Amino acid sequence: MYRPADHPWLSRVLFAFVLVATVGVFFRLQIMNGFSVLFSDRADGVIADAILEHWFNVVRGLSAWTEVNYFYPYQDTLGSTDGYFLYGLAHALFRGAGFDPFLSSELVNIVVKVVGFIAFFGACRRIFALPFAWALFGAALFTLSHASFVQAGHAQLLSVSFVPVLAVLLWETHRALLQSHRGKLLAYGFCAGLFFSAWLLTGFYMAWFFAFFCSFLIGALLLTGEKPSIQALTAAARNNYRPLVVIGVVTVAALVPFLAVYLRKAQETGVRSFDSAVRSTLAIKDIVNVGPDNFLYGRAYTVAVQALCPTCDTTVGEQTTGITPLLLILMIGCCLWLWRDQATSRQRTLLRGVALASIVTWVLCIHLRNISGWYLVYQLFPGAKALRVVSRYQIFLMAPIVALVVCYLAALAPRIPRAAMIALCGLLLLGELDSGASGTVALERQSEDNRTTVSAPPQECRAFFVTAARDQDSRTLANAVYPHNVDAMMIAERVNLPTINGFSSFNPPDWDFAYPNNPDYLARIEKYAAQHHLTGLCRLDLTTKIWEENWR
């Protein structure tokens, strides 16, 4: 049997090979096209890249961190959508090295995936005490996540890679608490609090999902845990209450920047209605909604759904976050194994808690004829009203599900022929692959770079608005809203001049900048300028790239 301790250099080589191969497979389409076409599209992708470019300006001392260069003259405009803070710091490094904004953003995505692989491997080893090979397999399976790939057009969702990072920090905090090692307790506790705050300021969905899941995990552990273990933890907390209070104070202080920006913006623009939230919860079919392009299951899923529900949509959309069938079956098998086996240990208690929390929170995200347990979450859980797409929770669930399944397979391995186990693991990995035919990779790097590269604005310009983008029409709402607004956002960051245009999750209350081809567009611009007493407002013609100071 292979033991890493006997061959440390071979283990490192194997780890590096699997890491590079896994991340390479995830980004294979970009690698094959020479990074000329990237994740996302010229709508959401350019918006995200504009925010990353904002952080490049912040790092260079050109912008206040709370103010992106769009929706001028509103304040705290970063709070209109995800903040991309941690992504932005990495983006600034790539920009400083001379890469263009769009390639830099994709390199950030690669870094995030690398972090996720390494952290999940570490979590498997530290938290679940898995052998080297199984931890490596778990890291590969988690990183390849089909739902993560299909939804990679929303780069903030790739921050699911941070789940194992925070999990390890909290685990080490927990261990230090039980050992009454106050130095480690403070160090890991501080890091956990600061990292969670930074994560919230990076991508709200996955950070919120983590807090949501952990709330139920704590309850599940109290329900399934052994009384002596709970008593030991309670005693440790009592003996170390001072460092715990300090950690709590530091965490709350670290949350202040996020809360100051986003709570104010929520009051200004409002939150999601429950009707919109429940529409984005999971139908039963969405539990395994892998879309039509999954290598193993895409065709079978499409045929099955069309046979059972001819009117149901089987194209790739925001509900395409399903767990692959084999992984789901093994998850069910793991749950049965955990509750049939009466063995008690700290490890088994943890796995039972993770399984129970996964199931309960998963069920809350499902609807049956518009009846959903999400109503309770929406009403009672802080921050739930800000979520637009509840189905994204399944992207998060890949972390606990993969951990459970890999622990289950590791326990079964001695009783199953090696060839059969290798084949099973191969099928699990293959099931996470998708052709990307539905447009996961669609952002044309050179075209977008050309669109948003303009000359420096005249010194008299204090802000600007844009005309219709090249070839823009208004036959669809998306075409009427996105092209000119997102180009304006990126240009504003690249020339460091604010624009009144823009588009995000929450637009200002008097935003009225759609349909730029309509005859009343300039009248709407003038009305907005008058309402906000704007002076020095210039026009940028996106077709000719000419700045106009006297456009009225």
Image: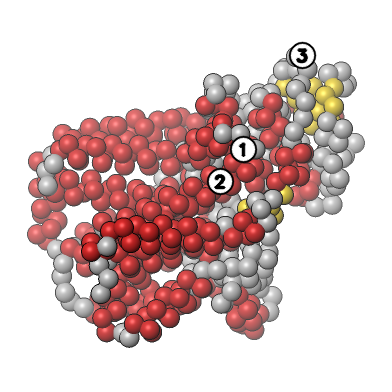
Q: Amino acid at mark 2?
A: Leu
Q: Which residue is mark 3?
A: 460
Q: Is residue 527 above or below residue 321?
A: above
- State the CA–CA distance, disc 3 to disc 1: 30 Å
Outermost residue on the top side: it is: 460
Dot 2 and dot 3 residues touching (CB under 8 Å)? no
Q: Residues within 10 Å of mark 3 (few under 14, many from 20)?
A: few
Sequence-first tag of 3 and 1: 1
Q: Which residue is mark 1?
A: 99
> Could you say where residue 291 lies in the image, as x and y percent from the top left?
61, 70
Q: Residue at x 43, y 62 (%)?
A: 18
Q: Is residue 88 visible?
A: no
> Could you say where residue 193 lies in the image, as x and y percent from the top left?
32, 39
Q: Quadrant of the C terminus?
A: top right
Q: Residue at x 52, y 50 (%)?
A: 110
Q: Is residue 350 above or below residue 255?
A: below
Q: Amino acid at mark 1?
A: Phe
Q: Which residue is mark 2?
A: 107
